[in-house]
Image (cartoon, grey):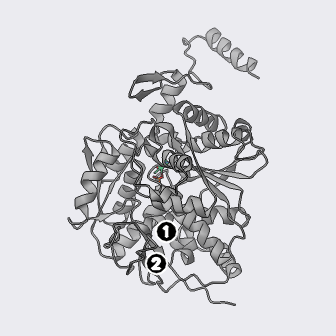
């Protein structure tokens, strides 16, 4: 049987700019190329028998080794950046289900849709898949303080993993612009929490400059090890589908780290022979916060290569889906590369479309946070445009748990949800409201309320 080594760290960091291609050791904590300032990839020489790997990963499901109980480290041969003696910081992340929904499929105009629900993670979002890898790397490099700038979920996840691993977490969040559940998590998990009076992009601009110099290890998605951890989301997805890729994987895009991770994971699986063909990625952005979408439209209209443009920016991004409220996505070049590699598309959806799609996912008994619902809203729009065929197999990624942002759900169902646009506030009219029924403590009134439920069927 071919040897499947999980002990040997292999590979190096490499600049994503092909004309530069500077390399750095895996012990380097830089997140940008010293020559040209571009992001870095972790590059390995993967050389294992794909069937042996599939067997090994399946067999590990019987194991009680903490690494094997993690849905990230069970696949460690595809992220082989650790040494054998390295300690792993795991909260049993990953292992998230694919949940089929006829109700959501009908809404999108599809025959079927499966939701890969990353809200089932320990802190309730896919950031855990990346954070176990990033914090593990930080610990084994002997770093003591880790930090991030966050729209909420990165900070919740970093706070948990850093505390669990015995490190100090410092998180920077845009004041008043993250969902309540996420802020509560950061405080509860013991992170030093700094609210900056700016939006995400403004906060990133001030903080990213000095954290590295201050000896603090940055855990944003510029951290290449976080991207490695997030790769395993697509590996786990393919394993669950018996290595038969779907036609489409649809996911929301904010800073575009996850889109980059998915594309890298898919390319590597194809190169290793774990899958035989590429699914197509569909990245969905919120209309008021859609720099990648605008860039691609402009490039198409002007007949130029998207990479020939400067970094796309939406100066004042707007969306109630705070997890994707990012105007200057740091991983835009990586995401463009993955769209090309997967023959992917980028779409944008309105606040109304996100809100209604979220309610539909809730009605299906699944639930998710606002940004996640961009997946279903985007799938529906792409079906309507004839880009996704109704019979094609679609995996929608639900990036975060419904309880992250309960105020949004309450406002939607009460009909008080409104967007804050440059030209004033606009009310979202819920297509699928579910208001609480208030009754006096009186049997007759309660019977009457029950009668109206029976009439609903
Ligand atoms: C972080 C996040 C996103 C956006 O992911 P990017 O990697 O920044 O594109 C989407 N949804 C949720 C719930 C998130 O936490």
Which residue occupies the extreme front position in the image? 302
Residue ID for mark 2: 81
**Of callouts 1 and 2, which one flags the residue occurring earlier in the amino acid sequence?**
2
In this rendering, the count of numbered labels is 2
Label 1 close to label 2 by CB (< 8 Å): yes
Q: Left or right: where does residue 276 sit relative to residue 428? A: right
**Is residue 89 visible in the rendered structure shown here?**
no
Measured in 3D between alpha carbons, the distance from the residue under mark 1 to the one under mark 2, in whole angstroms, is 9 Å
Question: Horizontal and vertical percent for residue 228?
Answer: 49, 68
State the SS at label 2: loop
Question: Horizontal and vertical percent for residue 245?
Answer: 71, 62
Residue closest to the eye, 178 or 424: 424
- Residue ID at (41%, 23%): 425
Residue closest to the eye, 364 or 339: 339
- Residue ID at (46%, 58%): 308
Residue 228 disc label? 1
């Amino acid at each position: 049987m071919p040897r499947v080594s999980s002990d040997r760290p292999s590979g190096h960091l490499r600049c994503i700019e092909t004309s530069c291609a500077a390399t750095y050791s895996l012990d380097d904590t830089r997140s940008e190329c010293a020559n040209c300032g571009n992001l870095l990839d972790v590059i390995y020489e993967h050389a294992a028998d794909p069937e042996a790997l599939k067997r090994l990963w399946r067999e590990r499901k019987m194991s009680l080794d903490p690494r094997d109980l993690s849905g990230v480290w069970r696949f460690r041969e595809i992220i082989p950046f650790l040494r054998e003696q390295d300690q792993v910081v795991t909260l049993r992340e990953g292992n998230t289900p694919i949940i089929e929904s006829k109700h959501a499929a009908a809404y999108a105009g599809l025959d079927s849709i499966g939701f890969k629900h990353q809200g089932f993670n320990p802190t309730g979002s896919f950031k855990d898949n990346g954070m176990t890898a990033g914090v593990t790397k930080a610990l084994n490099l002997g770093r003591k303080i880790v930090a991030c700038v966050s729209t909420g979920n990165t900070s919740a996840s970093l706070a948990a993993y850093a505390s669990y691993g015995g490190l100090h977490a410092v998180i920077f969040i845009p004041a008043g612009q993250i969902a309540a559940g996420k802020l509560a998590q950061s405080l509860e998990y013991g992170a030093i929490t700094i609210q900056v009076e700016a939006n995400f992009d403004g906060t990133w601009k001030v903080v990213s400059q000095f954290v590295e110099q201050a000896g603090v290890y940055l855990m944003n998605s510029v951290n290449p090890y976080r991207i490695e951890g997030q790769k395993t989301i697509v590996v786990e997805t393919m394993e669950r589908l018996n290595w038969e890729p779907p036609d489409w994987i649809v996911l929301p895009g904010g800073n575009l780290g996850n889109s980059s991770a998915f594309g890298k994971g898919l390319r590597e699986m194809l190169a290793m022979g774990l899958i035989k063909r590429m699914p197509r990625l569909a990245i969905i952005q919120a209309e008021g916060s859609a720099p990648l979408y605008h860039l691609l439209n402009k490039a198409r209209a002007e007949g130029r290569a998207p990479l020939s443009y400067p970094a796309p920016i939406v100066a004042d991004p707007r969306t109630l889906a705070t997890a994707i409220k990012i105007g200057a996505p740091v991983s835009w070049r990586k995401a463009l590369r993955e769209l090309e590699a997967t023959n992917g598309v980028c779409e944008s959806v309105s606040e109304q479309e996100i809100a209604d799609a979220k309610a539909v996912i809730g009605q299906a008994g699944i639930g998710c946070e606002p940004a996640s619902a961009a997946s279903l809203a985007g799938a529906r729009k792409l079906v309507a445009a004839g880009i996704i065929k109704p019979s094609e197999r679609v995996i929608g990624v639900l990036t975060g748990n419904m309880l992250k942002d309960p105020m949004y759900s309450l406002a939607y169902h009460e009909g008080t949800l409104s967007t804050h646009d440059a030209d004033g506030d606009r009310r979202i009219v819920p297509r699928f409201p579910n208001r609480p029924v208030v009754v006096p403590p009186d049997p007759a009134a309660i019977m009457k309320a029950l009668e109206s439920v029976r009439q609903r069927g």
